[in-house]
Image (spheres, helix red, strand yellow):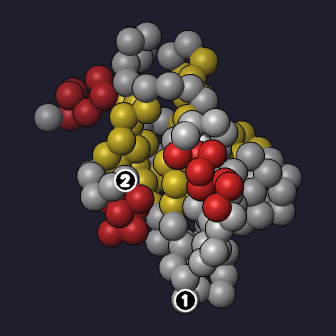
Amino acid sequence: MTPPSAVATLVALTPAAKLALGGGDEVLIANYPFKVGRESRSSNPPRTLITELRLSVEPPLNDVYLLEPRWSDLFYISREHFTIEQLGSRWFLVDRGSVCGTLVAGRLIGGDRAGGRTELRPGDVIVVGGVGSEYAFRFEIAADIENRS
């Protein structure tokens, strides 16, 4: 059984995932719901939005923003893609109505804006945006990481 004080993490498995984490290998998930989504690719975003975000007038949509390459014609990641939520000693990935969904341990969750939810287990691989996406993470729980060492 997972201790209630355990901390969950997302570990980057690909260069794109590592870049999304600011070059780090992992991000601690300290606040719930923990939100993940795509940063806008607009080359000329409205100045008012940037100013409002900088001044913290508008709350951020996500805790982690994933950038898709400008040269790509395909969007794999929705602006509001998924959350990770904790209920007691259990964690869940909840699709936020994404278009492409998310692969969790090889199983597609969400997609076609249908939503969806699945329990996360330590070691689950999360591919944001489904097959073809460059964003792959491994879900871990800090207590389990310590036990594997």
Among numbered discs 2 and 1, the one appearing first in the sequence:
2
Does 42 sit left or right of 13 as displayed?
Answer: right
Residue at 39% over, 68% down? 16
- In the image, is residue 53 above or below residue 39? above
Q: Which mark is residue 2?
A: none
Does 94 sit left or right of 4 as displayed?
Answer: right
Kind of residue at disc 2: Leu
Kind of residue at disc 1: Trp
Q: Secondary structure at mark 2?
A: loop
Q: Residue 89: image x %, image y %?
A: 50, 16
Q: Pointer 2: what residue?
A: 21
Residue at 71% over, 46% down? 95
Crowdedness of circle 1 by 10 Å Cα count: few (<14), some, many (20+)? few
Is any part of residue 60 visible from this angle?
yes
Q: Pointer 1: what residue?
A: 71
Q: Secondary structure at mark 1?
A: loop
Q: Residue 44: image x %, image y %?
A: 63, 75
* Mark 2 in CB contact with mark 1 (< 8 angstroms): no
- In the image, is residue 8 above or below residue 64? above
Q: Residue 146: image x %, image y %?
A: 20, 28
Crowdedness of circle 2 by 10 Å Cα count: few (<14), some, many (20+)? some
Does 10 sit left or right of 95 as displayed?
Answer: left
Is any part of residue 84 visible from this angle?
no
> In which quadrant is the C terminus drawn?
top left
Residue at 66% over, 39% down? 58
